[in-house]
Image (spheres, grey):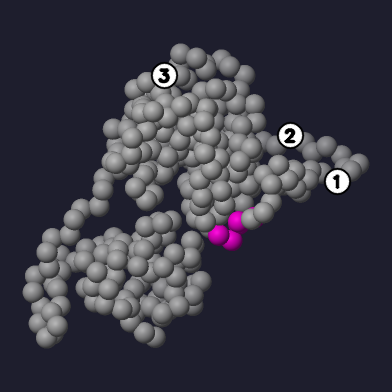
Amino acid sequence: MNALPARFEGSYLGDARRIGATTRMECKICWHVYDPAEGCEHWQVPAGMPFAALPDHWRCPVCDGARDQFMALDVAPSAMEWLEGGDMVPAPALAPAPAPPTEAIARLEAAFREIHTAQMRGMPIVNDALAVKAVGFRRHGDRWLGALVTPWFLNLVLLPGEVDEWSGLVPGDKELIEFPSGRYEYVHANRKGVGGYKACSLFSPMFEFASMLQATETAAAALVSLFDPAIREDGTQTAEIRRRREAELAPPPGAAPEAEPVAAARPSRRMVLGMTEPGIGNRGGDAGDA
């Protein structure tokens, strides 16, 4: 086992020696957490292994990100800095991590609650078991990535960062955005009271979901799966991906129809991401989807 090199991008001002033996580290790409108390089953790392002592070949088991893309979740109360001669001095204070844009997220939720109340109630595509909720917004590069659940759609959403100027986004314009699991079509939106943002449709309508918990858990799983390169299907057209998935789910010819299920089963992670690529998103949704 080899210790990490002295330079470390994510935490402790670039010095991996200042990562505590029990410090939990979080991947800033996909948010996977390495906990020394648990080790890493994927890389056969035993429990008790500090992050700084991981083998050289270790990478994030979820998104394959490098170790220098991990951030400390537990900051030591008296962090010290090593000097060349082996002495230690108090470390400069760490810059706080950017706070989620709570006001922008709240405005997004409020806008779609108003749409639900004023325009969507009683519409046949609305699932009355669901409500409007923003899910899992975290930093993604310079922007904020999360999901929005409503009674009539579930979308991935990108909110602008501090330096982005998205006030000029033209509603309806489309953009392909790259993730480890593939390229996904985001539709530009610009709503009064919210401003510019980008949305990628996962489900519309929402009758696959029997409860709000089921919908929010699926949204959270989809956000993680975006960073899973194992489900990438390069070179395959989106329409063909959907055609194959529908064929996999279809009953065999001549099979008797199944009884109506009591509750809709939660879609698998692979199915969720298969429905988010370009052209797969909306299945009878409304203009309010974005």
Magenta-colored stretch includes residue 231? yes
Q: Amino acid at mark 2?
A: Glu
The chief SS type of the magenta part is helix
Q: If you read the primary sequence from the N terminus, does the residue marked by circle 2 or circle 1 appear first?
A: 1
For label 2, the residue is 260
Residue 252 disc label: 1
Magenta-colored stretch includes residue 82? no
Label 2 secondary element: loop
User: Residue at the spot x=28%, y=32% of the render?
Assistant: 103
Give the spatial CA distance, label 3 vs label 2: 33 Å
Could you say which is closer to the camera, residue 284 or residue 233?
Answer: 233
Give the spatial CA distance, label 2 vs label 1: 17 Å
Which residues are the magenta region? 229-233
Q: If you read the primary sequence from the N terminus, does the residue marked by circle 3 or circle 2 appear first?
A: 3
Give the spatial CA distance, label 1 vs label 3: 44 Å
Residue 275 disc label: none
User: Residue at the spot x=41%, y=19% of the render?
Assistant: 114
Q: Please name which of the two marks, 1 or 3, marks the residue nearer to the observer.
A: 3
Q: Amino acid at mark 1?
A: Pro
Label 3 secondary element: helix
User: Residue at the spot x=28%, y=41% of the render?
Assistant: 162
x%, y% of residue 282?
61, 32
Left/right placement of residue 256 relative to residue 10 reads: right
Crowding at label 3, few (<14), some or many (≥20) Cα neighbours within 10 Å? few
Q: Quadrant of residue 26?
A: bottom left
Q: Quadrant of residue 78?
A: bottom left
Left/right placement of residue 65 relative to residue 242 reads: left
